[in-house]
Image (cartoon, rainbow, N blue to C red):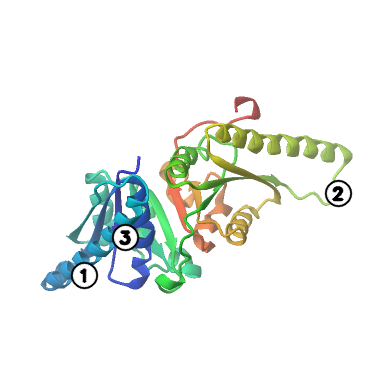
Amino acid sequence: MYNKILVPLDGSELAEVTLWYAARLVGRLQASLTLVYVTNPDELTSRHMYECYLKDTVVKVKADAEKIAAETQGGDITVDYRILKGDPPEEIINYADKNKIDLIILCTQGKGGIKRWAMGNVANKVIGATRKQVLLIRAKGAQSDVYKDRLVKVLVPVDGSRESESILHFVTYLASRLGLDLTLFHMWTRAFEAFPTKEMLKRDERTRKQEKAYIEKLGTKLTRQGLRINTVFSEVYQGEEAAEIIKLAEEGKFSMVAMATHGRSGVGRWIFGSNANKVLNEGNTPLLLVRPVKGKKKTIKNI
């Protein structure tokens, strides 16, 4: 499933925080890793400098990945590099497509969000255009600022739709191979009523029970597959969904948040509505994005 991983670098320590995660994924999954540096055509005279940097990085990452692999099944580890020339976002996307990359790992600058990247606006454009899965690593300044040894648990928000549940196929695979704990998070979004009637309250209580039953049944289903599953149910008002995800991810010190995007529309539209765009813009937890398989809204009876 994750056989080929791509990590774009720009020579900065910020971009290199992705390498810690890449080495662990490569080591556990026996995947191949390619480091990419995209140059401006005018910079070709510095190609030797780029090659020295990438070769040195390859040696370090491969050694790290081999140590991780040795802890489990072992096996050969493949890490190489490529120097491309042209427009960075376009070259990264084209390379990923042509070489059938399964996952692209990119870095952001902590609270600066999507508008501030180690590689300028490169990652923003890659996310918006690629059809590949993307893992975003939030960096607060340098490698030492990233939580280490925390590839332990993943927060998985789902809203009951087939699209949002597309993420489960991928995170359950990662959980089984990396020994991760999964926390399924479902929110019942309520409309604010200043003066609710008794009928409204009864209706809300029925809905609340149905929504809570949904996440509990989904958790039970995955637990039966031998996975370590937790479920969290929360009641929020409209417009608070993204803030609730960010809050839980940070307070629970999750290794990453895994979410599905809304198919072809990219990050601009989410399964959870426009408010969840804030998870991308304002969150600090590493974020795994997957484009979903389209489908109809699921009901409790379909689980």
Which comes before the other along the chain, label 1 or label 3? 1
Which comes before the other along the chain, label 2 or label 3? 3
Circle 1: is it few (<14), some (14-19), or many (20+) Cα within 10 Å? few
Residue 35 image-quadrant placement: bottom left
How far is disc 1 from disc 2 in space, using C-alphas? 65 Å
Q: Are marks 1 and 3 in contact (CB under 8 Å)?
A: no
Q: Which residue is mark 3?
A: 64
Mark nearest the camera among 1 and 2 is 1
- Res. 39 visible in picture: no
Q: Amino acid at mark 1?
A: Tyr
For the C terminus, the image quarter is top right
Which comes before the other along the chain, label 1 or label 2? 1
Residue 212, horizontal then vertical, whole percent = 70, 39
Q: Report the residue at 37% width, 59% height from top.
A: 106
- Res. 96 visible in picture: yes
Front one among 99 and 130: 99
Q: Which residue is mark 1?
A: 53
For the N terminus, the image quarter is top left
Q: Which residue is mark 2?
A: 195
In the displayed structure, 108 sits above or below 273; it is below
Mark nearest the camera among 1 and 3 is 3
Q: Secondary structure at mark 3?
A: helix
Q: Amino acid at mark 2?
A: Phe
How far is disc 1 from disc 3 in space, using C-alphas? 17 Å
Residue 155, horizontal then vertical, whole percent = 55, 50
Residue 18 image-quadrant placement: bottom left
Q: Are marks 2 and 3 in contact (CB under 8 Å)?
A: no
Q: Report the residue at 55% width, 51% height from top.
A: 274
Q: Secondary structure at mark 1?
A: helix
How far is disc 2 from disc 3 in space, using C-alphas? 60 Å
Circle 3: is it few (<14), some (14-19), or many (20+) Cα within 10 Å? some
